[in-house]
């Protein structure tokens, strides 16, 4: 028996058995599962404290996806809580009885983009699953180990997760490995704007309302105004197909066609999979909505990493954070509309792609790994003659040249490009 933890939005589950931070008495289930769910880490995490921190008596980390509360404070002596740290280099399980949390299981595994993370405790023994497959199991704990509580605070040692994740879920019931595999088939949720009402207005302040309902507007002087909105239709998905154009001399085809949006790092063509730079997504859609009494927002969904949007040749600027959306009402027209989205990703995928090809230059060994080695080893030992003489880089199959090995050929790729879904969202304006 045991338990299982999995995640879905960076909000902790309601505290154990409905309780908060007060001391609770109880014995954990023999099995529980913590669905850390879908996680997309941005950095590596501590997997080898002895190597990184040397003789430090109580190693620690600051990058928990789920923080382990003190089991002693919540349950009393002989109790601990478990927590999870998820990085691009693997998963670490920490248990916290009193004092500082203790690393009890390190599971080195490449985590590329959104991945499903699950922690299963059976009779006090932790096991880590990534995308439905068990990658590591640990030893039986000396404590009665509980799932973490809902709330964790910075002054307790908790921290902000460096990446994205869905909301953790704890299931206190028996689960088989096949059950875990089914959970792993879940797709990460799209990330539309979380607000049904937003402030807007250039000359006069106004509200942009995106959902039907009854609204109460309360002013500073206490006066209230009630109004109803009932003419907003459902969002419309712009599914494609999408043409993706790439720059010349970047080691990629001039363009590809995607029937539906997906991350470029999953493409079957290695040149596309390892592409870094700016690609241009274009498609068209037939618009039959009203332009008289509504505003229309184009929500790009998931973007890796930054986008520039144009509709029918009108530029709506750079969109660099969630929600990746813009009000495109002034550019919309009845009938066919042309969408162009320039998306720029990060360098790691191209650097990892180049590591698939033998390097003509010599670097100190140890580069491209994780931990301390990644920042102390991997420097170039001799600058090439072409670089010293200011000549063009010779054609050797590699697109880039660096003086440090930040990645290896086995490093996990980042999600890349426009992932979507791209939705046309109607809304109405209410002047204040």
Image (cartoon, grey):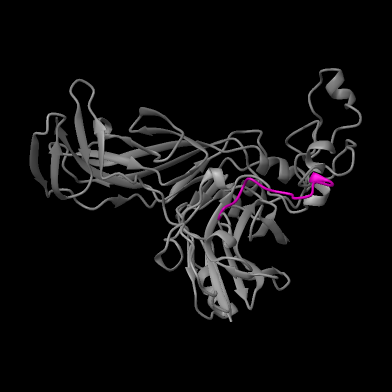
Residue 176, quarter of picture: bottom right
Residue closer to the observer: 263 or 408: 408
> Where residue 392 appears, x then y in whole percent?
78, 24
The secondary structure that dominates the magenta segment is: loop
- In the displayed structure, would residue 316 be above or below residue 30? above
Which residue is found at the position 14% from the left and 38% from the top? 217
The quadrant of the rendering that contains the C terminus is top left
Which residue is found at the position 54% from the left and 43% from the top? 154
Residue closer to the observer: 99 or 394: 99
Question: Is 250 contained in the magenta span?
Answer: no
Which residue is found at the position 59% from the left and 78% from the top? 177
Residue 255, quarter of picture: top right
Residue closer to the observer: 217 or 124: 124
Which residue is found at the position 73% from the left and 36% from the top? 399
Residue closer to the observer: 307 or 166: 166
> Where residue 334 appears, x then y in whole percent?
21, 40
Residue 294, quarter of picture: top left
Q: Is residue 65 left or right of residue 58?
A: left
- In the displayed structure, would residue 90 be above or below residue 181? above
- In the displayed structure, would residue 266 be above or below residue 334? below
Total marks shown come to 0
Q: Which residues are magenta?
A: 53-66
């Amino acid at each position: 028996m045991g338990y299982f933890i999995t995640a879905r939005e960076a909000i902790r589950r309601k505290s154990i058995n409905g309780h908060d931070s007060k001391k609770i008495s109880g014995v954990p289930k023999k099995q529980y599962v913590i669905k850390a769910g879908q996680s997309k880490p941005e950095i590596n995490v501590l997997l080898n404290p002895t190597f990184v921190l040397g003789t430090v008596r109580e190693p620690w980390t600051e990058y928990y996806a789920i923080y382990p509360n003190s089991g002693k404070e919540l349950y009393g002596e002989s109790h601990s809580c478990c927590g999870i740290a998820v990085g691009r280099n693997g998963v670490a399980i920490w248990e916290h009885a009193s004092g500082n949390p203790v690393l009890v299981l390190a599971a080195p595994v490449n985590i590329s983009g959104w991945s499903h993370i699950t922690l299963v405790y059976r009779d006090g023994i932790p096991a880590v699953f990534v995308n439905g497959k068990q990658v590591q199991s640990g030893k039986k704990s000396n404590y009665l180990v509980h799932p973490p509580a809902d709330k964790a605070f910075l002054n307790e040692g908790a921290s902000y997760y460096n990446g994205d994740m869905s909301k953790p879920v704890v299931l206190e019931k028996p689960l088989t490995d096949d059950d875990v595999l089914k959970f792993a088939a879940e797709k990460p949720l799209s990330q539309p704007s979380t607000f049904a009402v937003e402030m807007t207005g250039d000359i006069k302040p106004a509200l942009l309302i995106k959902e039907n309902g009854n609204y109460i507007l309360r002013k500073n002087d206490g006066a209230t105004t009630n109004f109803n909105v009932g003419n907003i239709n459902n969002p419309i998905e712009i599914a494609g197909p999408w043409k993706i154009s790439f720059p010349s001399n970047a080691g990629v085809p001039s363009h590809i066609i995607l029937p539906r949006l997906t991350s470029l790092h999953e493409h079957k063509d290695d040149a596309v999979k390892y592409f870094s730079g700016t690609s241009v997504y274009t498609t068209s859609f037939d618009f039959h909505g009203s332009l008289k009494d509504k505003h229309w927002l184009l929500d790009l969904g998931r973007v890796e990493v930054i986008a520039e949007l144009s509709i029918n040749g009108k530029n709506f600027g750079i969109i660099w954070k969630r929600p990746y959306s813009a009000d495109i009402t002034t550019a919309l027209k009845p009938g066919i509309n042309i969408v162009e989205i320039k998306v720029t990703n990060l360098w790691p995928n191209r650097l990892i792609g180049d590591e698939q090809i033998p390097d003509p230059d010599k670097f100190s060994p140890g580069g491209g790994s994780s931990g301390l080695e990644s920042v102390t080893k991997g420097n170039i030992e001799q600058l090439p003659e072409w670089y010293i003489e200011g000549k063009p880089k010779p054609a050797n199959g590699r697109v880039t040249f660096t003086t440090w090995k930040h990645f290896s050929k086995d490093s996990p790729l980042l999600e890349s490009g426009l992932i979507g879904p791209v939705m046309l969202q109607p809304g109405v304006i209410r002047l204040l």
